């Protein structure tokens, strides 16, 4: 198994592709890859429709999967706010690689005559180690996508991110099965001689205490522990220190427990969701998610130091537990990177500090996909996280 990752900020797509493809060719010893992952910034939008064919022809592989992205990760760089192309190439002996596309309508309509996931993907659940997923953000019901895949492939790791790089339907591009598509989700099923471990590192820290939602309506959290949600928030702000107050003014979120039933909740148990407004009439908080009575929630703030500490802790535990991965696929939130840390390449450097000089590639997305605490059968969309797929051989000759 060999992996190579590279990226380019060349403003011309033809130049960027040549530079990155040449690096893959050299890294793989001139052999054609079995798989190429391609991530491209919206600066190259005019080339989206021909990108799968152009990459496949230049790299000599029939399997090109990827998407547009607000930022890309490849080689030694996280490239944000600039023209960028990243390619990840892999030679995968004794590994099954199955690209697939599922249209948004197939998920939404639940047509009983529609192909099953096994028919779409091309691998049986017993043959599947991981599913790498890239849905688009406007028409795809990501929650339904993840639920249906958890049911169909309970023992497979599901990981990835929502494609980015566009603000309206049709602007975001997905690449798979030799074409550029604009709706639904694309992905890759992997099976055979490989293991894909997952890691989801948080970008926020909790403030205050966990609370029960005692009254709610749709996406409004009306009461928390029997009190108006806005009053609870005001009281928390008034008793907080200067650092927390500043964070609450600029980057306040609501964490919703993903897996209920625990006696205690900590970092990683909450799915962080945006607070999008205040209902002055009811005192409720509008949240970018459905809120249900009985759910445990806790306020969160975005925090660079907590983010760095959580990522390092996850990586250190992984490094201590087993063999070094052959590659790391990184799916990071658009709210991380330079905007969070104030410097480029931060998460990438953390990965290499803890795991060594391993190839890392991926993109910045509109929501990260991965399990909580590594439980493969329960997959969620996260916010402000970095979701990592750590790939290695199952059997070493």
Image: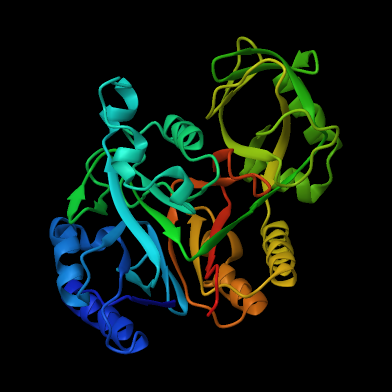
Q: Is residue 185 left or right of residue 347?
A: left
Compared across the picture, whether 61 is left or right of 243 comes to: left
In the image, what residue occupies the spot 47% across and 36% down? 146
Confirm whether residue 185 shows in the render: no
Q: Compare residues 283 and 196 and report the one nearer the observer.
A: 196
Report the colour scheme: rainbow
Q: Is residue 321 visible?
A: yes
Residue 65 coordinates in the image, percent (x, y): 29, 58
Residue 250, placed above or below residue 229: below
Numbered disc total: 0
Q: Position of residue 274 (x, y in %)?
A: 56, 36
Which residue is painted at 77% across and 21% down in the image? 212
- For the point 52% across and 75% down, the residue is 326
Image location (x, y in percent) of residue 76: 47, 80
From the viewer's side, name the closer residue of 42 and 114.
114
Which of the image's four quarters has the N terminus? bottom left
Residue occupying image coordinates x 48% and y 66%: 193
Q: Position of residue 340 (x, y in %)?
A: 58, 59
> Which quadrant would residue 319 be assigned to in this image?
bottom right
- Can you say whether 336 is above or below 120 in the image? below
| 25 up-or-down from 285: above or below | below
Q: Quadrant of residue 261?
A: top right
Comparing 13 with 232, the one in front is 13
């Amino acid at each position: 198994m060999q992996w190579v990752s590279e990226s380019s900020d060349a403003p011309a797509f033809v130049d960027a592709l040549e530079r990155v493809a040449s690096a893959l060719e050299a890294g793989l010893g001139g052999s054609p890859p079995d798989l190429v992952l391609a991530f491209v910034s919206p600066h190259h939008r005019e080339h989206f429709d021909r990108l799968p064919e152009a990459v496949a022809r230049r790299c000599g592989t029939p399997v090109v999967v990827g998407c547009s992205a607000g930022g890309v990760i490849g080689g030694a760089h996280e490239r944000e706010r600039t023209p960028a192309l990243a390619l990840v190439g892999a030679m995968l002996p004794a590994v099954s690689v199955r690209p697939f596309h599922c249209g948004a309508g197939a998920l939404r309509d639940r047509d009983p005559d529609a192909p099953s996931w096994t028919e779409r993907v091309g691998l049986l659940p017993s043959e599947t180690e991981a599913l790498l997923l890239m849905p688009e953000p406007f028409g795809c019901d990501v929650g339904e996508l993840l639920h249906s895949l958890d049911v169909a492939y309970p023992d497979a790791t599901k990981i990835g991110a929502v494609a980015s790089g566009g603000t309206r339907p049709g602007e975001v591009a997905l690449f798979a099965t030799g074409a550029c598509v604009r709706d639904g989700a694309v992905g890759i099923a992997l099976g055979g001689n490989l293991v894909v471990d997952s890691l989801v590192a948080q970008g926020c820290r909790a403030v205050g205490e966990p609370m029960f939602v005692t009254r709610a309506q749709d996406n409004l959290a009306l009461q928390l522990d029997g009190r108006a949600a806005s009053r609870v928030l005001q009281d928390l702000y008034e008793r907080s220190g200067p650092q927390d107050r500043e964070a609450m003014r600029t980057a306040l979120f609501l964490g919703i427990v993903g897996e209920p039933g625990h006696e205690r909740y900590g970092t990683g148990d909450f799915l962080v969701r945006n607070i999008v407004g205040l209902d002055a009439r009811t005192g409720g908080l509008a949240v970018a998610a459905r809120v249900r009575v009985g759910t445990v929630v806790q306020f969160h703030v975005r925090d660079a130091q907590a983010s760095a500490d959580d990522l390092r802790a996850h990586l250190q535990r992984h490094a201590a537990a087993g063999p070094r991965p052959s590659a790391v696929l990184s799916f990071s939130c658009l709210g991380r990177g330079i905007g969070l840390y104030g410097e480029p390449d931060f998460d990438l450097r953390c990965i290499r500090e803890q795991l060594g000089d391993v190839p890392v590639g991926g993109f910045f997305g509109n929501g990260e996909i991965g399990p909580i605490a590594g439980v493969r059968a329960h997959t969620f969309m996260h916010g402000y996280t970095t979701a990592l797929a750590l790939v290695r051989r199952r059997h070493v000759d």
